[in-house]
Image (cartoon, rainbow, N blue to C red):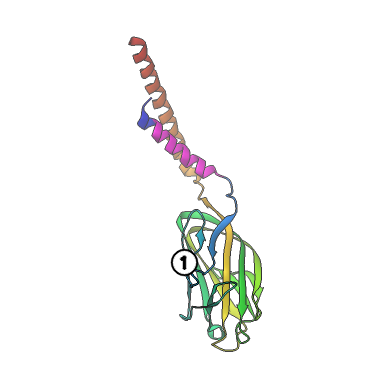
């Protein structure tokens, strides 16, 4: 058997299988605890799901900071009375189909901070949540699907009465799935004859090898 031919055939089969793959199972796409393991604060994710190569936080007013969390440290920001927004950006290893299913987080606001919040993606409201002056756990059901090599979630605080009013987020976990983009029909039309040619070549190579063995 021609080893190189066999390897090429396996590669084409993998392409076809990835294009035909069904929905991926739900996993934790990103997990933030905001604790660096030594009592300090970090914006680096605690864990990333397969296919996720980066996750970062930023805000519009450059007011990101950290405050006491639940436990440890928590991400915090202010300026919501003047329109500040938080953004969570995820980068994927390639163009992928993504499905967002749940967002878990612990939230707390100061008395002059936001009274509620909403979560958006590309201008679409995904969910709403309430805020109080004590930490509470929020589990938001999501039903957002899309395709690409990245996505951005926008966190908008509503009802803050002063610029200094703060909003804290801790133990942020986004659940969902990532899957390869299915091959279009035209790609299958191209791949199918190529696989046929490979199979034919493989058969020829096998026949030649058998003849050689008989002659020997």
Report x, y in % for residue 61: 47, 81
Report x, y in % for residue 212: 34, 15
Whether 12 is among the magenta residues is: yes
Whether 19 is among the magenta residues is: yes
Q: Residues within 10 Å of mark 1 (few under 14, many from 20)?
A: some
Instruction: Indicate left or right for 151 with 101 as reference.
Output: left
* Residue at numbered disc 1: 44
Q: Is residue 54 above or below residue 198?
A: below
Residue 45 vs residue 162, the one in the foreground:
45
Residues drawn in magenta: 6-21
Image quadrant in which the N terminus is located: top left
Callout count: 1
Residue 193 vs residue 44, the one in the foreground:
44
Q: Residue at x 60, y 88 (%)?
A: 161
Image quadrant in which the C terminus is located: top left
Report x, y in % for residue 113: 60, 84
Report x, y in % for residue 7: 39, 34
Q: Residue at x 62, y 71 (%)?
A: 106
């Amino acid at each position: 058997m021609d080893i190189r031919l066999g390897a090429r055939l396996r590669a084409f089969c993998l392409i076809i299988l990835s294009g035909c793959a069904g929905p991926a199972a739900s996993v934790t796409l990103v997990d933030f605890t905001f604790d660096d393991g030594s009592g300090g604060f970090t914006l680096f994710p605690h864990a990333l799901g397969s296919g996720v190569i980066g996750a970062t936080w930023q805000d519009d007013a450059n007011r990101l900071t950290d405050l006491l969390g639940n436990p440890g440290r928590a991400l915090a920001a202010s300026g919501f009375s003047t329109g500040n927004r938080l953004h969570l950006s995820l980068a994927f290893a390639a163009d992928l189909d993504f499905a967002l299913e749940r967002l878990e987080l612990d939230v707390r606001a100061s008395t002059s901070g936001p009274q509620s919040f909403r979560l958006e993606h590309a201008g679409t409201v995904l969910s709403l949540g309430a805020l109080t002056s004590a930490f509470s756990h929020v589990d938001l059901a999501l039903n957002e699907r899309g395709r690409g090599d990245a996505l951005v979630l926008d966190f908008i605080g509503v009802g803050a009465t002063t610029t200094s009013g703060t909003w804290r987020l801790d133990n942020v976990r986004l659940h969902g799935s990532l899957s390869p983009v299915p091959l279009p029909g035209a790609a299958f039309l191209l791949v199918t004859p190529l696989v046929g040619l490979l199979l034919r070549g493989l058969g020829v190579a096998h026949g030649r090898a058998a003849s050689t063995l008989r002659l020997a």
